[in-house]
Image: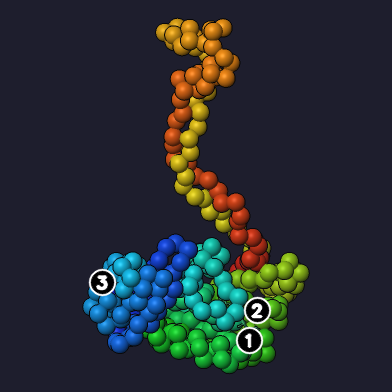
Amino acid sequence: MSFIEYQNDIKDGDTAIVFLGHDSMFPIKVQHGSQTQTKYGVIRHSTDLIGKKFGSKVTCSKGGWVYILHPTPELWTANLPHRTQILYSTDIAMITMMLELRPGSVVCESGTGSASLSHAIIRTIAPTGHLYTVEFHQQRALKAVEEFRDHKVDHLVTVKNQDVCKHGFGVTGIADAVFLDIPSPWEAITHAKSALKMEGGRICSFSPCIEQAQRTCQAMEENGFTEIDTLEILLRVFDIRTVNMQIPDLGKGEEDTSAAECDENRKPQECAKKQFELQGTVAFKTAVSLKSMSGHTGYLTFATKSLF
Ligand SMILES: C[S@@+](CC[C@H](N)C(=O)[O-])C[C@H]1O[C@@H](n2cnc3c(N)ncnc32)[C@H](O)[C@@H]1O
């Protein structure tokens, strides 16, 4: 298993996602002799997982079942152990496109945080690109190194434990793109500029507050960045429901004899009920937006460093 290549069979040491439902899944490290508890009973790694195919339906000890999924950056983002606030797939999708990331891209990022975005960048730039990620919190930096090794992507990423605002990214003139998710990104803009290639590249900074975005835009302008754009992405999720709707009464057709049944001999309630039955209902599937919607995550400020 690797986060950049699909593999059929589950092996000892792999990371897998135990899927109980869309709102209930968690990652596990598959290990000979290990067991994982679920509400449907225990999963024994040696007999239930190792050698089985990713995507298999696995029966747990109490008779219930779960699916075992191959990890992807999106599933990892939805299930990773949080060491910090993280970026989610909606923002990540926009960042990937607007930074023009592709196989072979060289990217600088800070801070690494919980490495949610890092996994998505690595998957996009593989197999020939490289990510330089900077995190000044030592334990977080070390944990990220361990995860990248576990997920077999460590050859595509270098983790540096330093302050990006003071010491930059540790590389000069090689990056196609720079991404910042730190409290004071405006202090890292000159370092971002020197990390980018001479001929130019793209930058993105993520900030929850508009004042941070304003200061970052100013710093970008002072450093000669162009095409400065700040935007926010909001996700609307829909549920598919079966809805029963009453067919509207558009008047009685000529062949409709039901009117005769609603004469003065009937009680008004009975008459109304009869007419409703005759009118009937229609059942159809429709998309209904969820009652609550995830709110503001942050502003994304994009800009370009150009040769001229
Ligand atoms: C919000 S988290 C980043 C989350 C990350 N984008 C993700 O998707 O998991 C911000 C991280 O930046 C680190 N950080 C803040 N200021 C920094 C600086 N000046 N240099 C390096 N790292 C910094 C923090 O320690 C924290 O881990």
Which residue lies under the disc numbered 3?
53
Q: Nearer the viewer, residue 45 or 37?
A: 37
How many angstroms separate mark 3 from mark 2 (CA)? 40 Å
Q: Nearer the viewer, residue 201 or 306?
A: 201
Residue 199 visible = no
Residue count near mark 1 (Cα–Cα under 10 Å), binned few <14, some 14–19, many ≥20? many
Compared to residue 261, the image places residue 68 above or below, namely: below
Left or right: residue 42 versus residue 218 is left
Question: Do the CB atoms of the residues marked 1 and 2 lie less than 8 Å apart?
Answer: yes
Which residue lies under the disc numbered 2?
182
Which residue lies under the disc numbered 1?
164
How many angstroms separate mark 1 from mark 3 (CA)? 42 Å
| Quadrant of res 21 | bottom left
Mark earlier in primary sequence (3, 2): 3
Q: Kindly tell me whether mark 1's CB lies below 8 Å from ligand 1.
A: yes
Left or right: residue 80 versus residue 211 is left
Q: Kindly tell me whether mark 2's CB lies below 8 Å from ligand 1.
A: yes
Residue located 44% across and 8% down the image:
257
Residue sitting at the far left = 51
